[in-house]
Amino acid sequence: MPIAANNDEEERFQVKIAWLYHIEGLTQGAIADHLGVTRLKVNRALGDAMRNGVVRVSIESPYAPCLDLEARLKDRFGLAGASIAPEPSDDANVQPLVGAELGRYLSILLTDPAIKLFGIGWGNTLNFAIRSIMPSRRGDLEIISMMGGLPKGSGINSFEIATRLADLYAAERTFLTAPLYASTEESRDTIRVQDVFQDVLNQIRQADAIAMGVGDMTDRSLLVRDGLPGGISAEILVAAGAVGDMLGYFVDETGALIDHPITRQVIGISPFDLADMPNVILAAGGQHKVKIITAALSTGIFDVLVTDQRTAESILHTKP
């Protein structure tokens, strides 16, 4: 009986502390003064109340499941951070939603004076992100495009994306002024040895942060639709094991480069050169991109993932 009475008294104390803290809004110091106990005892009582089920926290918000997904993604892939947008009501809204989430993330990141050189890829998600970024003046900031361009003009091509982002910050801009693919490995090597291209590639490797997307193997991908070299089709690349591309380099479901000549025709930097760089951000969403996002995360290249709730759940359901 003494033990039961003692436990009952302890629970009453926890309830009193929890009520004062969570309901009446008193600080731990104020509660300690009010009850004539130490602040340490108040702190311990609050912890015990949570562990014993006296206090239960319920977060009623569409963002609540996203926080759980962020923690699980960080744990599984060793990420430093994850930012998950709520589940879209229509799958067609995935890219604008993920883009807006990336825009919010970059609006904070790019105000950091430590970020002086920022590399950016191209694509629809990054295009939507730029629409959502809060403008600022960063005369000390330089934006550098990480990929060559496509032969067909597009508002989501590398030059346009880098230019629009630089304009938002009144920043300097540097371009990789080359096509994404050379016609052969030999011509790729001829172009890449030129000083002007080596300088840009080396500059990209010095970036303080990078944001990029990934492409899938459907014709929803701008690269698959308009950018593949002549004689190469999505079907050929899929037969070689491709699930998508990173910076124009096609990879299999493990994240390894496929065995195909196209991997030796890319003029731009390899995604694997980014492995030791800080703040490498992957932004992509949609069920059609689950395979390539999972493959990309499996490489260990990325520090941060920005995606949507449904895609995050699908990624976590894939086998490691």
Image (spheres, rainbow, N blue to C red):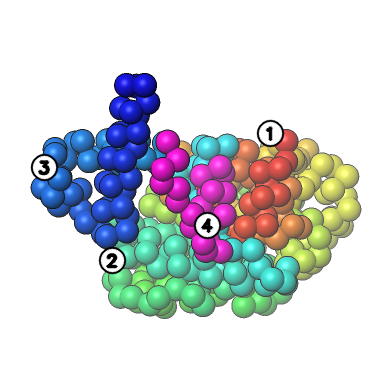
Image height of 67 relative to 139, above or below: above
Taking the image as shown, residue 311 lies to the left or right of residue 208, namely right
| Disc ID at residue 140 | 2
Q: From the viewer's side, name the closer residue of 184 and 216.
A: 216
Task: Report the span colored magenta.
Answer: 52-73
Q: Decide which of tag 4 and tag 2 comes sooner along the chain.
A: 4
Q: Decide which of tag 1 and tag 2 comes sooner along the chain.
A: 2
Tell me where residue 161 appears, x and y as whole percent: 54, 71
Query: Which residue position holds label 3?
Result: 36
State which quadrant residue 230 falls in.
Answer: bottom right
Q: Amino acid at mark 3?
A: Gly
| Disc ID at residue 64 | 4
Taking the image as shown, residue 225 lies to the left or right of residue 84, namely right
Taking the image as shown, residue 320 lies to the left or right of residue 283, namely right
State which quadrant residue 239 falls in.
Answer: top right
Q: Decide which of tag 3 and tag 4 comes sooner along the chain.
A: 3
Q: Quadrant of the N terminus?
A: top left
Q: Amino acid at mark 4?
A: Ala
Tell me where residue 318 appears, x and y as whole percent: 72, 41
SS at mark 4?
A: helix
Q: Amino acid at mark 2?
A: Asp
Does any portion of residue 229 appear in the rendered image? Answer: no
Q: Decide which of tag 1 and tag 4 comes sooner along the chain.
A: 4
What distance separates the C-alpha of mark 1 from that of mark 2? 42 Å
SS at mark 3?
A: loop
